[in-house]
Image (tube, rainbow, N blue to C red):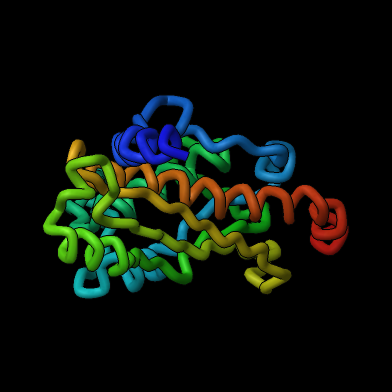
Amino acid sequence: MKNCVKLLPVLFLLTSCYTTRITPEILNPSTQNNDFFEQFNIEINEQSFSEVFSPSHKIIDAEYYEDDDVDYREVHVINETKYAADCKNLIRKYAGVPDLHFHNEKPTLVFSVNFYERKSADALRFISVMTFGTLNLAGLPYNRTVQYIDLSASVYDKNGNYIKSYNGFGRDTFLGGVYYYSSNQIRPSFIKTVKKALKEIDNAMANDKKNVIALLK
């Protein structure tokens, strides 16, 4: 029993120091539906991202101008959070397209974000205050943060008629301790949260894509 008590600070320390590194592997969601995506235009619902991640900003991707013999494109700077940008990039990689692509003769698959929230638990903070941080020095985390996201991929036929949607829910938790700053884990945890939601969508698509393709013919 005494040995177990002695090991508790070590366990606290190891738990508190756990970190996730952002690597090329973590930034590339896997899919089993490459053949499915090839049959669609891939589109991102910019309005949903604006409303969930940066509701006070209007998003303008680009404007096109014609001037006699020259057509040119003026790109505006988009003021959006890095989490919205990360989520869009993960979706693009997941769908296998470097950017959005459109072919009028194809149906469309539209990705949207429906909900996102980041919550912190108060229990660990209360313990930290009541013990004057002594347990935190031994390695006890002082914070526990949970992130939630709900994504959807909606199928539309060539005429823009709605067919059906696939939904995915993602959740991930990380701890903050004295020996590393918890904000270092917010972004890696967010990436894992999005990937979990995409995984749910991917599984739902894999089980149903034959039925949807039949409906689109």
Residue furthest to the top: 24
Where is 177 relative to 47, above or below?
above
Q: How many marks overall? A: 0
- Quarter of the figure with residue 127: bottom left
Residue 69 in view (yes/no):
no
User: Where residue 140 appears, x then y in whole percent?
Assistant: 28, 47
User: Where residue 68 appears, x then y in whole percent?
Assistant: 22, 48
- Quarter of the figure with residue 177: top left
The residue positioned 15% from the left and 64% from the top of the image is 129
Query: In this rendering, would 24 be left or right of 54?
Result: right
Query: In this rendering, would 166 be left or right of 143?
Result: right
Could you tell me which quadrant the C terminus lies in?
A: bottom right
| Along the line of sight, the residue nearer the viewer: 178 or 148 | 178
User: Where residue 122 appears, x then y in whole percent?
Assistant: 28, 69
Residue furthest to the left: 132
Residue 148 in view (yes/no):
yes
The residue positioned 67% from the left and 63% from the top of the image is 166
| Along the line of sight, the residue nearer the viewer: 97 or 62 | 97
User: Where residue 134 appears, x then y in whole percent?
Assistant: 16, 49
The residue positioned 67% from the left and 40% from the top of the image is 38
Query: In this rendering, would 6 be left or right of 213?
Result: left
Residue furthest to the front: 2
| Along the line of sight, the residue nearer the viewer: 74 or 13 | 13
Query: In this rendering, would 196 be left or right of 182?
Result: right
The residue positioned 41% from the left and 37% from the top of the image is 2
